[in-house]
Image: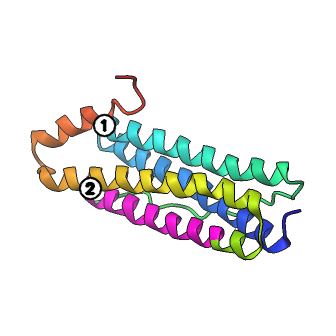
Amino acid sequence: MLSKKLQEAINEQIKHEFYSAYLYLAMAAHCESVNLPGFAKWLKVQSHEEWTHGMKFYDFLVDRGARVVLLGIPQPPAAYKGMLEMFEEVLAHEKKVTALINRLYELALQEKDYPAQVMLQWFINEQVEEEKSASLVVEQLKMVSEKGGALLYLDRHMAKRGEKD
């Protein structure tokens, strides 16, 4: 049986995952408003991934006979000065989520909850990928001028996320 402490912490993580989905959707809306549909698509795919992460935690609680309590989600920022600033925020956010997942794992260790440890291992591995992906975009944006044609080229490249090679 899941401890009350771990159940509450996972419910809190559900909130963070859904906030991530909401944040990336807000960023996508900003990209749409500045005519960068490729960046918007990348962020919409990311938003969907975050939603599925929240549902993975949701399903874990249900499968363990625990109660899911959906907590309030704050409103995300709606505008950014540029794509570099936005993706630096994405990277910082992913690092924050990594820290939250690591704390959850530490709690699962303390509580000797082996099923939670196994489930959280998937998230630990996923966060390595999430940070790598965001870091790559940040580094590429640093290489291009935000006012030049290179940004439009990168936008088209971003639009291909989720397509099969």
Residue found 37% across the figure and 33% down from its top: 161
Q: Is residue 17 left or right of residue 78?
A: right
Image point (68%, 55%), residue name: 118
Which amino acid lies under the numbered mark 2 shown in the image of this protein?
Val
Tell me the element at label 1.
helix
CA gap between label 2 and label 1 equals 13 Å
Provide residue 111's location: percent of width, then percent of height: 77, 73
Q: List the residue tagged with mark 2.
A: 138
- Place residue 95 in its image quadrant: bottom left
The N terminus lies in quadrant? bottom right
Sequence-wise first label, 2 or 1? 2
Q: Which mark is residue 158?
A: 1
Number of the label disc, if any, that sits on residue 118: none
Q: Amino acid at mark 1?
A: Met
Residue extent of the magenta highlight: 83-105
Where residue 86 appears, as percent x and y from the top left, is 33, 57
Q: Quadrant of residue 2?
A: bottom right
Q: Kindly identify the residue that appears in the image at 13 percent across and 41 percent down.
A: 150
